Amino acid sequence: MELKRLDDRMVDFIRKQEMVFVTAALGGRTARRGPVGFVQVPSRRLVTWPEYERTPISGPVRLLLLDLLHERTGLHVTGRASAVSYGPLQVASGSDPVLVDGPVPECWVRVRVDQAWFADQGPLV
């Protein structure tokens, strides 16, 4: 079932991932990796992760998060990406962002969720 916001299963699924595949509407595909929990869910309509590139992803995007070992499914999220200054992230659940040693991110990439669905359910047609 396709939703206009993330449900509990989706939020839990995202928080367990170490990688997200990103396809930008203006061309270009990339993957972002980090420790479990590097992709944050500040609200049911927002997904964000720290960005280390000088030119962050922006505009319409499709995200794909895969778990082929345990849940054997993928989560598709479409929305609009924008970059915001890097700093403490307010997360609705009260969990803190995952901090790792290494370079400081350039910014947060924030994706406003338009639609989300699991591959095993498919989008509504």
Image (spheres, rainbow, N blue to C red):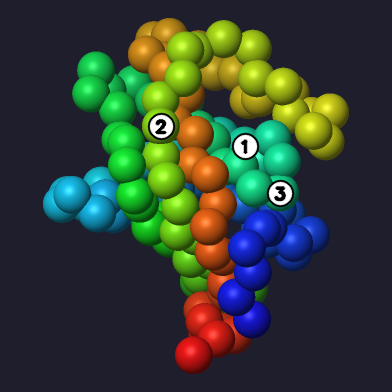
Q: Residue furthest bottom?
A: 125
Q: Residue at x 62, y 63 (%)?
A: 4
Q: Which of the marked residues, 2 or 3, is nearer the chain's N terminus? A: 3
What crowding class fits label 1: few (fewer than 14 Cα within 10 Å), some (14-19), or many (20 or more)? many
The quarter of the rendered structure image containing the N terminus is: bottom right
C-alpha distance separating marks 1 and 2: 15 Å
Name the residue that disc number 1 marks. Answer: 40
What crowding class fits label 2: few (fewer than 14 Cα within 10 Å), some (14-19), or many (20 or more)? some
**Image side of residue 25 versus residue 110, left or right:** left
Name the residue that disc number 3 marks. Answer: 44
SS state under label 1: strand
Q: Is residue 86 above or below residue 117?
A: above
Residue 82 image label: 2
**Image side of residue 24 versus residue 94, left or right:** left
**Image side of residue 47 versus residue 80, left or right:** right
What type is the residue that disc 3 sits on?
Answer: Arg
Query: Which of the 4 quarters of the picture holds residue 23?
Result: bottom left
What type is the residue that disc 1 sits on?
Answer: Gln
Residue 17 location (% of width, % of height): 56, 50
Q: Residue at x 64, y 12 (%)?
A: 88
Q: Is residue 107 above or below residue 45?
A: above
